[in-house]
Image (cartoon, rainbow, N blue to C red):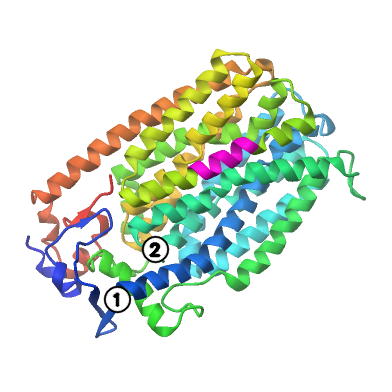
Amino acid sequence: MSAKKDESSSVQSTEKQPIHDGLVSADASDVEIAAFGTSVQFSKEEEAALVRKLDWRIMPLVTILYLSNFIDRTNIGNAKAAGLEKDLKLVGYQYNIGLSVFFIFYALSEVPSNLILKRVGANVWIPTIVMFFGFVTFITSWIKDFSSFMAIRVFLGIAEGGMMPGIAYFLSTYYKRHELVLRVGIFVSASSMSGAFGGLLASGLLKIRQLDHLPLGRWRNIFLVEGAITMLLSFVAFFFLPGKPEDTKFLNERERVIATERLRVETAGLTKTEKTDFKLVLRAFTSVNNWLCGLGFLLCNIPTQGVSLFMPTLLKGMGYGTIESQLRSVPPYVVACSWSIFVAYGSYRTERRGFWVLGTSLFGIAGASVLVGTANKRADYAGLFLLAMGVFPLGPLFLSWANNNAAPHTTRAVSSAMVVSIGTMGPIVSSWAYLPKDGPRYVTGNSILIGAIAGLFISTVVLILYNTWENKARAAGRRDWRLDADDETVANLGHLHPRFRLTI
């Protein structure tokens, strides 16, 4: 392969080997790389110790932050079951309109948010947006009518939009491609944990008397307390969330070198920290992988957000009371959370994404089919377990799939936000899937979920076939013409480099 232009920055022992699913084949126990003009060696044991240190410092914090994010987003469903519509005098489809407007502004804020994050640093920007959406959640306790309800949903969408793609991009600056899916799976599992915690919190807060100085409605306790907790967490994040790996203070000098250079080893010097360039931004929008991951994320978000926003409503439709419906929403989320982590781990170990999407989605189709096909209370409740297991693991798989196949850093940052932005169109559909006129069984809404999961199944098959075909083309040398360019262009090829292998 004629790759002379970029050989100076590559790993000597692996310079002619392709990068396959984020790994360069190497048998040596030590890795030798060029760093800061010198030869740097580190052992696998040192790298493993570094990853453990990163895991203990980063993963608990980002998981808790995303948990608070998702609780503050979906507590509207708990409040609805507790009388929000009646107290705000919402009529017709006004509640659904409020849900929709949140996701519109959520989607619009994601790409700009990630570009700001790349400029100012995750250690500054992520705590800032956590404080913002915590404050918006807190003041939701004082809304009185449809107008204030709409205004608060707009600001909450703007505040929360950058959270998921921001954390995903932040993790990609510390973890290798094959390590990323497990970490994304862990932090996004907070979305299913939020249903469990949110249900328990809501049931407890609804049992106490209404807090002083609030308008009528005990559901206001939910927003007041949960918003206050989120704002406190933002202060913790300001102090403990690390910045860029090359200058973070929680790593010593040697660990910083290893943290930075091991990612370059992974890509054999194909990527480097680069200035934000419009061409690299545009590259994210011309990636077939991104569009198909975005489509899959959109389709999986329809059932995921449908379950998150309407599970208490579905349970009330089955005949359970207000408090019992909150409590019965907890077990399906606990099971879905455990299953999500298992699926993420399986995908991490096998270094595959698509096959895990296909297998997991079958649970979702089965669960939604039970809800459509029977009015039996126990069977429908079991169907909720299958549905939650079948849809909650999918988002992390699609998001990490997009991150795996995007480089360099600017392209990856935009790819994360782009995929989540496309995916955010899905919840707009789910906001209108469960209409009051369709209760108590909501056959139309559950049928929409079946169609969405079937659609993502098909799009995943297409993506597997496309990436397999593209990898074969690169292996056969049909993309080597991209190397006939100047040194800077070749250095910034990223995922377009002929030696880069797409994750399947």
Q: Is residue 423 magenta?
A: no
Q: Can residue 370 be seen in this view?
A: yes
Residue 57 at what x, y percent from top left?
53, 69
x 40%, y 43%: residue: 398
x 68%, y 17%: residue: 440
Q: Which of marks 1 and 2 is in front?
A: 1
Which mark identifies residue 43? Answer: 1
x 40%, y 78%: residue: 256
**Which amino acid type corresponds to the residue marked 1 in the rendered image?**
Ser
From the image, give the main secondary structure of the stretch colored magenta.
Answer: helix
Q: Give the range drawn in magenta.
A: 331-339
Which mark identifies residue 232? Answer: none
Q: How crowded is mark 2: few (under 14 residues within 10 Å), some or many (20 or more)?
A: some
Find the distance from the CA under tag 1 to the CA under tag 2: 17 Å
Q: Residues within 10 Å of mark 1 (few under 14, many from 20)?
A: some
Q: Work out whether 135 lies above or below 15.
A: above
Q: In which quarter of the image is residue 2?
A: bottom left
User: SS of the residue at dot 1?
Assistant: strand
Q: Work out whether 332 lies above or below 439.
A: below
Q: Name the residue under label 2.
A: 175
Residue 407 at what x, y percent from top left?
31, 58
x 92%, y 50%: residue: 213
Residue 443 at what x, y percent from top left?
58, 16
Front-lying residue, 89 or 166: 166
User: SS of the residue at dot 2?
Assistant: loop
